[in-house]
Image (spheres, rainbow, N blue to C red):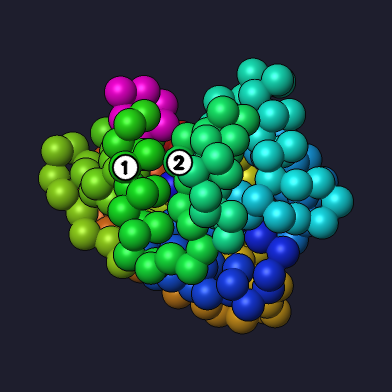
Amino acid sequence: MHILLIEDDLNAAAYLIKGLVENGYLVDHASDGETGLQQALNTDYDILVVDRMLPERDGLSIIRCLRASHNNTAVLILSALGEVDDRVEGLRAGGDDYLVKPYAFSELLARLEALLRRGSAEKSLSRLSLADLELDLLEHRVTRAGRVIRLQPRELRLLEYFMRHAGQLITRTMLLEQVWGFHFDPQTNVIDTQISRLRAKIDKGFTPALLHTVRGAGYRLDESA
């Protein structure tokens, strides 16, 4: 699942990103409201986690702009403003849930899971597939030809990124930035190691091979050889 976190408190953002990544989520981060709005409008996210008080543009303004543009991505609002009127205002602005700071990470995680379940009827949000390979995003469950494949959290995020971009050339730099979430030396062998492990799990013993190396360019998840 792909989440956009819009939070200007960098320490709070780092804490949330670490916890979400450890639980198998792919997380993008924006530290001001205007940047966050543009990212939300231009990228297909499963959930937005939006702080209410932000520089450049406040959280409720972001949500109103999204709803006005017919963007119905689920939004969890985070705010230190916890009075009934504050919560009502947030929900009426178009938020799907409202969590008051300070909060327990376990509660935030449970609320995200509830929002994902709420939209689970839409298969395009909850399941990705290519040939006989399927990834259930809600259950974090991978199968190929009906056989369950057990992946580690990083492998799951890697596979999700490939499946969301099936048929496209994916470079090492793209993977490092989008899956690992930070800029890293593209010459490191961490990508090769993870790709090798993922390929062994999703391709070994199956036909056709799906995860291909494009020599000198990157990788591609595709049914064709």
Marker disc for residue 114: 1
Q: How many marks?
A: 2
Marker disc for residue 97: 2
- In 3D space, how far apart are the residues under numbered discs 2 and 1 (Cα atoms)? 10 Å
SS type, badge 2: strand
Marker disc for residue 7: none
- Residue range in magenta is 120-126
Left/right of residue 32 with respect to residue 217 in the rendered view: right
| Residue pictured at 69% horizontal, 29% vertical | 64
Up-down: is 3 above or below 117?
below
Residue 200 position within the rendered picture, expressed as x and y whole percent measured from the top left: 30, 62
Label 2 Cα crowd, 10 Å radius (few <14 / some 14-19 / many 20+): some
Determine contact: label 2, label 1, CB under 8 Å: yes
Residue 47 seen anywhere in this rendered image of the structure: no
Viewer-nearest of labels 2 and 1? 2
Residue type at tag 1: Ala
Residue 161 position within the rendered picture, expressed as x and y whole percent measured from the top left: 50, 49
